[in-house]
Image (cartoon, rainbow, N blue to C red):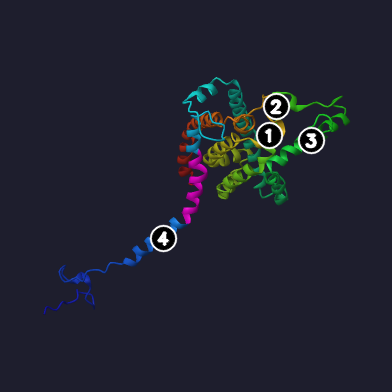
Amino acid sequence: MTTIAPAPGRERVTESDRSPAERVPERVDHSRERVRGLDTVWLLVFLAPFLLLYLSFTIWPLIATIYYSFFDWSGIGPIEPFVGTRNYSTILADPLFWVSVVNTLVFALLTTAIKLPISLVAAILLTRKWLRGKPFFRTVFFAPLIIPVAMAGLVFTYLLNPSNGALNAILRDFGLVDQGFDVFANRWSALLVLVLVSIWQIFGQYMIYWMAALQNVPDELYEAAAIDGASEWKKLTRITLPIIRPVAVIITLLGLVNAMHVFGLVVTLTAGGPGTSTYVVSYFIYQNAFGRVPFAYGYASAAALLFSVIAFVLVSAQGLAVRRAQRLRKEYGV
C-alpha cells in the first residue's frame, strides 16, 4: 500500500496531494436541485391564478373581438352572418368614427401637456425641505383620485349647470356675466371641460410618480451646487431635469395611454354632446355595442380593433424614446 506524504509546509494530506486516480469523487449535492425543483413548482402555483385571469380577461377577449369583427352580429343569438372586412370598410368611411379619433387624440395630448408640468412643479415643491404642511398638501392633491369617475362627473355637471350651477351664480354675483352660459353647448368648450376635470381628478397620481422619480436625485448634488452658489433654477435645469429625464419619458407614455381610455367623464358630463361632437372612441364603441337597437356588436368590435391598431402605432413610435430613456437610466445609474 502506497503512503502519501503531505506536501512541504502542510501537516495533513489534502486532495491536491493525491494523484487524479486516487482522489475521491465529489458527492453530487442533489438537495440544491430538489430545492430548485420545488421553487419551480411553487412559482407555477402562485402564478397560475394570475395567468388564468390574464388569459380570461385579456387574451380571450382580444381573440374574440377579432373574430366578432368579421360578423354583422348583434351580440345576441347565433354569430352570423359573416361579412368579412365590410365592417372595417364601413368604419373607415364613417365620419363619426374619425370625429371620435380626433377628439380622443386632442383630449390625450391636452391632458398630458397640462397635467405633467404642473404635477412636476407640485412634486418639486412638496419634496423641498423648507416647505411646511407637506402631509396636508399631499392629501389635498391626492383626494380627488379616490372619488369615482361617475361621481366626479355628476358633481361638475351640477356646478356647471347654466341655470342653477354654482359657477354661473358666482359670475353673476360678481357682475361678470348677465346670464348663465352653457359650457356644454359648444364642442371645444365641452372638450376643455373634460380635459380640466380629468386633470383635477388624476393630478395626484402623477404627482406621486414625479415624487418617486425625484427621490432618485442624490442630495449630495444639491449640496455641491449650493456651495457653488447655484440658484434654484439652475439646480432644476442642470441637475433635476437631466436626472429624471429617463423616468419622465415613461411617465409621459403612461399619461398618453391612460388618457386614450377616457370614458366615464364623457358619459356623465357630455354624453357625447352637443350632438355627437364630443364622442371619443370608447364612447363610440359603447354606443354601437349597447347604446342603440339593434346592437352592432360586430361593428363595435371592428372599431375597437381598428383604434387599437392606431394606438399601437402611436405607442410604438414612442418606443424609440423609451429605449433611449433606458440607456440614460444606466448612464445616470437610476
Spatial CA distance of label 2 from label 3 is 18 Å
**What is the spatial separation of the Cα atoms under label 1 and label 2, in whole angstroms?**
10 Å
- Disc 2 designates what residue? 273
| Label pair 3/1, CB-CB below 8 angstroms | no
Q: Mark 3 highlights which residue? A: 159
| Mark 1 crowd level (few <14, some 14–19, many ≥20, 10 Å Cα) | some
Q: Is residue 48 visible?
A: yes
| Mark 3 vs mark 1: in front | 1
Q: CA distance from mark 3 to mark 1?
A: 16 Å
Are the residues flagged by discs 2 and 3 in contact, CB closer than 8 Å?
no
Q: How far apart, in angstroms, are the residues tagged by discs 1 and 4?
A: 48 Å
Per the rendered image, the range of residues in magenta is 46-61
Query: For this rendering, which residue is in front, 27 or 137?
Result: 27
Q: Is residue 167 left or right of residue 112?
A: right
Disc 2 from disc 4: Cα separation: 56 Å
**One can see residue 334 in this view:** no
Q: Amino acid at mark 1?
A: Val
The kind of residue on which mark 2 rests is Gly
Q: Is residue 230 above or below residue 162?
A: below
> Which secondary structure, mark 1?
helix
Q: Which residue is mark 1?
A: 267
Query: Residue 68: x and y, percent?
Result: 50, 33
